[in-house]
Image (cartoon, helix red, strand yellow):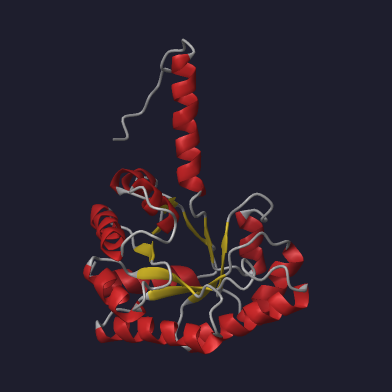
Amino acid sequence: MTIAENAAELRRLHTAPELLQVVNVWDVVSARTVAALPETRALATAGHSIAASFGYPDGEIPVDLMLDMAGRIARAVEVPVSADLDDGYGDAGETVRRAIGEGIVGANIEDRLKPLAESVAVVDAAVAAAGAEGVPFALNARTDAWLRGHARPREVWLADTIERGRAFLDAGATSVFVPGVFGEAEIEELVAGIGEQKLALIGLPGVPAPARLEALGVARLSYGPTTQRIALGALQDLAADLYAGGVLPDGIRPLN
């Protein structure tokens, strides 16, 4: 597929009635491992996980390193890849242009609860840059209205989330990512306010199962840094077992 066709497929996956599940990856071997599964229709990078791989705190990795790894991932697999581009690294348009050059066809860009007009301008810049490249980029515009503002009354952060989500969609975003742990009632309100097949969530303990999210009209479910944490937990547990006198288990798969 051409990059434009790959991008169009990623947008289609977001708007299809079926829930799009993207298992987050952080390097080439993790990407190839997940992409090898026949159920994998797209991948998403986890910015937190890539930053950790290079020894940086979340949000502090240089843009060049982030784009280089995202590009390596995109070139290593055949499915569309969406990248976590933090807040756009100070120039969302240029960052998206460079991401497209690396083979990336979608992205998360977060608002960090900055003033709405400023946040909409970031979405505008990202969408315009993709349009100039002739790529129907799948922008999953993230709002932190709950993460940074959930101490506010429920009706306040919920209204803020919906207002921001609608504004991002009006500016050309494909979907709106609202990270947080929500029950069914809150998800129903978010879908009603933002739109069916427009809401993206993160899979965490306490979030309804994928089949239920699909029935509620959620577009996309990702898993953030949790996938890397589980892999690292397994590694640490194995090391502890070996130090305690254990041996390697049978049936090790040569996935690398």
Which residue corresponds to the image point at 45% horizontal and 37% vertical from the top-left?
A: 232
Q: Residue at x 62, y 70 (%)?
A: 217
Report whether 68 appears left or right of 48.
Answer: left
User: Measured from the top left, where is residue 133 in percent x and y?
Assistant: 24, 82
Q: What residue do we see at 70% from left, 76% from top?
A: 158
Pick out the residue farthest to the top: 245
Residue 255 horizontal/vertical position (percent): 32, 35
The answer to whether 105 appears left or right of 108 in the picture is left
135 on left or right of 117: left
Rendered-image quadrant of the N terminus = bottom left
Q: Nearer the viewer, residue 77 or 62?
A: 62
Give the residue drawn at x 30%, y 65%: 63
Where, quadrant-wise, is the C terminus in this rendering?
Answer: top left
Q: Is residue 46 visible?
A: no
In this rendering, does residue 158 appear at all?
A: yes
Task: Examine the image and state in which quarter residue 66 appears.
Answer: bottom left
